[in-house]
Image (spheres, rainbow, N blue to C red):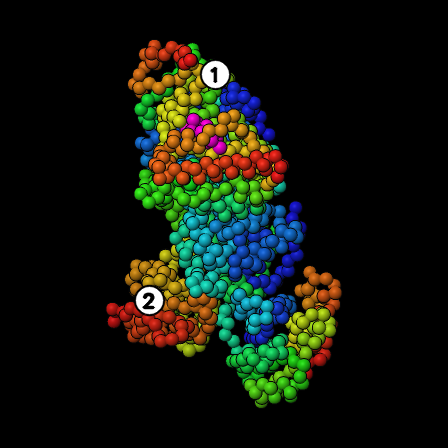
Amino acid sequence: MAEKFDLQEREVWDGNYAASQAMRQAKVDVMAAYPITPSTPIVENYGAYVANGYVDGEFVMVESEHAAMSACVGASAAGGRVATATSSQGFALMVEVLYQASGMRLPIVLNVVNRALASPLNVRGDHADMYLGRDSGWIQMDAFNSQEAYDLALCAFKIGENHSVRLPVMVHQDGFITSHTAQNVYPLTDEAAYNFVGEIDPVDDMLDFSRPVTYGAQTEEDWHFEHKAKQHKALMDSVPVIEDVFAEFEKVSGRKYKRVESYMMEDAEVAIVALGTTVETSRVAALRMREQGIKAGVVAPRVFRPFPFDEIRDALENVKSVAVLDRSSPGGAMGAFYNEVSAALYTTENRPLVTNYIYGLGGRDFAVKDAMDIFADQKANADAGHITTDIQQFSGLRGPKLGFFKTKRG
Amino acid sequence: MQDLKLCAQDKRGIHELEAGKDLIGWDEVTQGSVLPSFEGDASNVAHLKQEERCYSDFNSYTATVASWRVKKPVFNIDVCIDCQNCWVWCPDTSIISRDKQMLGIDYDHCKGCEVCVEVCPTNPKSLLMFAEQEDLETALSQWPEKKKKEK
Amino acid sequence: MIEIRWHSRAGQGAVTGAKSLGDIVATTGKEVQAFALYGSAKRGAALRAYNRIDDEPIITHEKFMYPDYVLVIDPALAMTDDITMNDKETTKYIITTHLDKESLIKEIPALQGKEDRVFVVDCIQISLDTIGRSIPNAPMLGAFVKVSGMFELDYFLENMKRVLAKFPQKIIDGNMQAITRAYNEVK
Amino acid sequence: MAITSVKNLKEFSTANDRFEGAHTLCPGCAHSMIVRELMNCTDDNLVVTTNTGCLEVSTAVYPFTSWDTSWMHIGFENAASAAGGAEAMYKARKKKGTLKDNDAPVKFVAFGGDGSTFDIGFQWLSGAFERGHDFTYICLDNENYANTGGQRSSATPIGATTSTAQAGTHSYGKKEKKKDIVAIMAAHGAPYVAQLAPNKWKSMAKGFQKALETEGPCFINTVSPCCTEWRFDPKDTISITDLATDTLMFPIYEIIDGHELNILYRPKNVLPVEEYLAAQGRYKHLFKPENKHVIEEIQKNINEYWEMLQRREEARV
């Protein structure tokens, strides 16, 4: 039996510590991991729990992230609760196995501490790795601060392990900005946390020898499409479970989560749509814009996959001008998040103006002032009735102003 | 053996492997493409002979690769010494051996590789290849005599 | 909101200091943030750590700040780093140095005219004397407690003991002495 | 403990097959002989993981499986990690008492071809051995990437022609030596490492049983003649293996705890390697006069290696 861990009602934890505490409280059976900045402390913290008897499960320190996710797949198919953590290049190395984990419908929880992808090498936070996982068939939830990194990690087990979902879940937090920023975190007691998450009820358990199963069969053109469609539907159908789990979590914690978090959107004329810590920084900016008489609001997907197409549309359809912020180098296109939000808005009657800002790459600071400038652009667009800037711009970039594409409207 | 459910027998060779079977839709394929090998409780499977097991439709035991063969091995029980060479080296689990006795060929699973004939030590061999369409009686009637050792 | 910027070298404990401060401030019911600007920094590299303290949950995640306090725990950085960056009319400076205040300000033109907001304390010597190693973070906390008036010294010491609970008693005692000495010696 | 007896073939033949027919491996494939023998030499519950390769694509083609036990394939390189993960889960659940049957013995086995073992999956294999997972890794060594049409691997021997190391007017095929995987795995300090061959069924079955019963990571390299890529008649799989072991191209031996070497088969008449090479199409070009030196080199390497094995055995090192 694991030793009792002393917790205060109010802790000061960084995002990494918060995530590792959630794994301890969920009584993970196997954690297989390989350290990489900035998610290393999640693995180290967990190692400290192991060393001091705070966990009963197995801790497997593998030789690469690819092996980490591979061991997680083997462990998860063997019927217990499994979690790990990674970032950036490690995430990229895992990608092959991410698809295999979701294809096999294994409810592994992966804490992704977002970090830029090389080259050039950079250890700080942007969303390149998060985007790299966006077609991998995992549920992706996004924390904007340390408290949420903890809360969502607990929710992740309950969502993924639900029999009508049975999908792996990523919980994202911003590298350094969340992972290494200590702030007030209000944890559940160990008992409340475990009661909330509950015991895992295995499906297709490789260690149940009364019913041997084959995992990872090959499907060629006569079967593959059907399997992938079924998997996609499971991901799309996870929405009510996610909402139920969020509702249950509110009951035990008092903290309310929604698939899309809207801030001061009731009467908003202009909006920023963002991910990660930028969401909260933009909220500060929105407040300041309102002091200037500009009706600004912020919309953010809490759940990035399944993409909340409907909720995004509902949140933004009555706004005049929207800025979608992509914290990932778009690689020869509009930002991926921009494209997804735009697609949702194209189906509305109002069709707000939508522009794209690339920002914060490699951890470049995104200040309240930057968000206020973006709101000001949106106000100008709203007043003009058309986009007054390039459709894709760069915020916080040194050198001559960089932008792409002009509007054909107005 | 009487009270065991003999469901394996009626499933033998009902699926032509390449033909695929019942190309069902996305709503009916198994979750995660996971395939259970048996129906019901299979805890004891290592202690059951194949004909005593409840194979699921997904088990390749229920499928056949008979059409792969051009020639087939024929077994002559009169010459066999039950050495089990053919059993141990058959790559297709197609030698039916029970209670230390060689009983015959599983023609649903035999691909006609001829390894069993090669490894048969008897003189004449107790397994020989014949044309696929040859019937058993004709084949046995053509069985060669014991070869004399060349001096 | 109160904002604090630490100037330090990796290994001197500014990150731990900022986190410990956050931890203790949180016990008073306030909301805190403690973070640092570092990445692959090896021991000796200059780094900055930050605290924010407020009555409301802190939702800004910008690194940018107008500090209310600047805590410099490396003597050389006081000279070489831009310690007055983005300061305010009211920004207070606590600087580790073996010099007296006048001599120090003479060396750092940026501090001239801010004499009443500059405080000095020799955190390096204090930590050497009390902890036995050059770990100037704990004494800086003692000086900060005095200059900010944010806590009673005893309250701070009690809570610091909890933060340090995992360390051997000798280390805890050394830290307590360091904090107390700096509290009394900061000028 | 396995109750299956391998005292003699008659006893062994009472084992109930747990690897089923109607898989799609080539007729005469040695892979399935080896896998059958592994599955038949134990009654214990097995969790088997398999790297991408011929075995994997032929035994679990949706909607069919040939495996009567828990089986998993993830990717080309990571069967060892998957086995390690499953083994860790077994330990965790046994400790917590959440297994369906907490007392039934479970063994973990990973299969890989030489491509996934010697090359792409080597890091995963090495990592799993360093961590000491309680499992047995069996390499089905057919000395090429047979699944994708016979490309060279680091297990391909000198002089063999493959699609990516072809014999031609300016080439005699592969020029580089085969990687000594057995020595490398023994160097991990693994408790049991062996090279075995399906023609020597008894030493193979005993080796498998020993590996399964030994705690910790065990490695077995098995010779798996590939009629398709080695270019011989499927019926000759066992006779080719006889030539492999009797020419000492594939010596049969084990290494205990990284140092104690035992030779498990000594041919009464050691055959010249030409006999083995001549039986396979992949070496046909070596019999041209200009390639004579290659055969000589192969024979020299065999002689030296055999000498080394004998000396190590004698010296008990």
Q: Is residue A339 above or below residue B41?
A: below
Q: Is residue A42 left or right of residue A91?
A: right
Q: Position of residue D176 (x, y in %)?
A: 43, 44
Whether labels 2 and 1 belong to a single chain: the reply is no
The N terminus of chain D - image quarter:
top right
What is the C-alpha distance between the residues marked 2 and 1?
80 Å
Across and down, in percent, residue D207 comes to 55, 31
The image quadrant of residue D187 is top right
Give yes or no for residue D242 being in the magenta stretch: yes
Front residue of A258 and D64: D64
Q: Nearer the viewer, residue A137 or D266?
A: D266
Magenta part mainly helix, strand or loop?
Answer: helix
Question: D124 or A112: nearer the eye?
Answer: D124
Q: What is the tally of numbered marks visible in this picture?
A: 2
Q: Secondary structure at mark 2?
A: strand
Q: Which residues are magenta?
A: D237-248
In the rendered image of this protein, does residue D166 appear above or below residue C112?
Answer: above
Residue D150 drawn at (x, y percent):
37, 40
